[in-house]
Amino acid sequence: MYTVSNALKAVLDHVPIPGSERVPLVESLGRVLLESIVVPEDVPAFSKATMDGFAISADDVAGIGGYVPPSGLLRLRVVDSIVAGRISSRRLNSQEAMQIMTGAPIPQNCACVVPVERVQVDVPDPEWVGVPVSQMSSGLNILTAGAIARRGEVLLKGGIHLRPAQIGAMAELGIVDVLVSRRPTVSIVSTGSELVPSGASPGPGQIRNSIQPMLTAQSLTAGALPQVLGICDDDPKHLRLKILEGLQADVLVMTGGVSVGIRDLVPEQLLLAGVKRVFHGVWMKPGKPVWFGVFRSDSHTCLVFGLPGNPVSSLACFELFVRPALGRFLGLADPVPCTAVLSQRCQVRGDRPVYQPVVLSGGNGTLEAQPVSWTNSADLLAMVTANGFACLEPEHGAYDEGDAVEVLPWGIGNW
């Protein structure tokens, strides 16, 4: 039987080369960038004021080493007013100032901008201002052309999830579309005659289908496009039709019917549909009956996961195997294990590695794992406070508070 690490390697080895597509910039949030973004022009394209104030000529700034009036103010005549989006048509000369607004282009021969709150306006004659000599420093409150970025510099490298600020930065540069990885499609099928939709009232012996909404949400947070194919009862013909429909996607995830019971029909029907089995069963708890195979046609590959019907098992198997596969589809780096310290003593029961639900939290640079009390793999309600799994190895024996364990944070918000 496969170990978790061997099973994950087998899954990742079968993921096809990521596809790509060019999409409008406004549709690229959370997508994986597949090209480098090069700055096409200097930023800013022109020198601009960073504060509301008065533009002072280079001649006057150069002359402040000489005579300074007793008042400390240099009396200058206001010859223009520049707002954002307007360029002054005249050169700024000695003994002149121009009122200028934040973001407005700096006029010719301007050395600095003195903030408006530092300047004394001559109330009787507002065409004149008194500018403190102490505030007249070359370059003050001016953002020069190219100070932020130069044409030809690399702004973004491929392989990153695009965030809002990055999208805004590309928009500032005039970029309207980007090359990103294609989002994989995930068909989701729940099997079992005992299942009813989550909004229905169960009859005798029936249960609501909690797994399908959960897997849909997990697929979305993994960057995929889920396609919910509904519930399939334990009928071979019905199951076969659902499988054939699901194989049109990049990934088919089926839940239930993968163990060894008389109504566990999924493995047989997958094989009859042309899916090649890679493994059936992984040495872990929960999720031991997990099934994985690959369907290939002339121009299409579909990865097929048969997950156990208990919801916690499905949750664990998705995070351990399906999410990393979807990451490969998107061109992401493979997940890297991380460690945390246990906040309390834990005991491993049985001979399989246990993926213990935990609440992961950080503090003082250390990740802490607080075990969540749960009864068995059907106890989905216990998961509402958890945000990850800790792998507890049976050969370790009892775990003490403060012991380091490998943890798997649930991948929420990655895109």
Image (tube, rainbow, N blue to C red):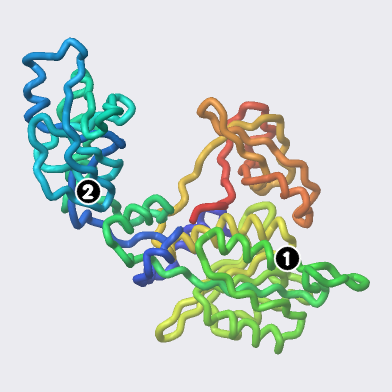
Q: Position of residue 231 (x, y in %)?
A: 73, 77
Q: Nearer the viewer, residue 87 or 350?
A: 87
Q: Position of residue 211 (x, y in %)?
A: 71, 64
Task: Tell me, for residue 43, which label it has, or none.
Answer: 2
Q: Residue at x 69, y 33 (%)?
A: 398
* Quadrant position of the N terminus in the picture: bottom right
Q: Residue at x 49, y 63 (%)?
A: 326
Point out the tag, 2 or 1, that comes first from the N-terminus. 2
Q: Residues within 10 Å of mark 2 (few under 14, many from 20)?
A: some
**Picture layout, residue 16 above or below residue 30:** below
User: Along the horizontal axis of the image, is 119 left or right of 333?
Assistant: left
Say whether residue 304 is visible: no
Q: How many marks?
A: 2
Q: Position of residue 307 (x, y in %)?
A: 65, 66
Q: Which residue is mark 1?
A: 309
Marks 1 and 2: in contact by CB < 8 Å?
no
Q: Nearer the viewer, residue 309 or 264?
A: 309
Q: Nearer the viewer, residue 266 or 414?
A: 414
Q: In the displayed orientation, state which residue is furthest to the top.
A: 70
Mark 2 residue type: Val
Say whether residue 80 is visible: yes
The quarter of the picture where residue 136 lies is top left
